[in-house]
Image (tube, helix red, strand yellow):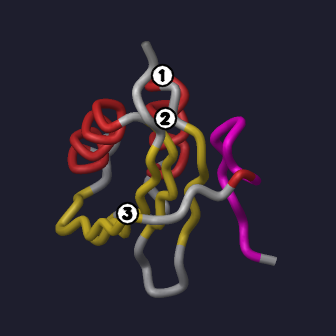
Amino acid sequence: MHEELRSKRYFVSGIVQGVGYRYFVERIAQRLGIAGYTRNLRDGRVEVYAIGGAGSLSALEHELRQGPRGASVSDIRSEAAEIDPRYGDNFSIEFDN
């Protein structure tokens, strides 16, 4: 029996750019079977859009709070999001144009 899929958007603040945070998120998401993306925001935060079961999303949020070595997470804001089928198959790092 599979968990019902849901999606959340996380906004991670602190020292999270220039420290490999997006690559850390990509590895964790792949390990947890989560689809979606992560990207740097112009205001210094990192956005994580994640699609997965409730347990996987909870585990992801725990890992987001830890971050990789060199990161210092000061805050995480999360919100429910619509499931976007464009990101339903894998997890990627997105870059601004």
Looking at the rendered structure, the secondary structure element under dot 1 is helix
Q: Left or right of 1: which side holds 57?
A: left
Residue at the (40%, 34%) spot, across then down: 53
Q: What residue type is labelled 1?
A: Arg
What mark, if any, has residue 10 been given in the picture?
3
Q: Which of 75 and 16 is in front in this view?
A: 75
For the view shown, which residue lies furthest in the bottom direction? 43
Per the image, the residue denoted by label 2 is 29
Image coords of residue 19 (percent x, y): 44, 54
Looking at the rendered structure, the secondary structure element under dot 3 is strand
Tell whether position 65 is magenta.
Answer: no
Labels 1 and 2 touching (C-beta < 8 A): yes
Q: How far apart are marks 1 and 2 (CA)?
A: 5 Å
Q: What stretch is highlighted in magenta?
A: 86-96
Per the image, the residue denoted by label 1 is 31
Residue 25, placed above or below residue 43: above
Labels 3 and 2 touching (C-beta < 8 A): no
For the view shown, which residue lies furthest in the left direction? 74
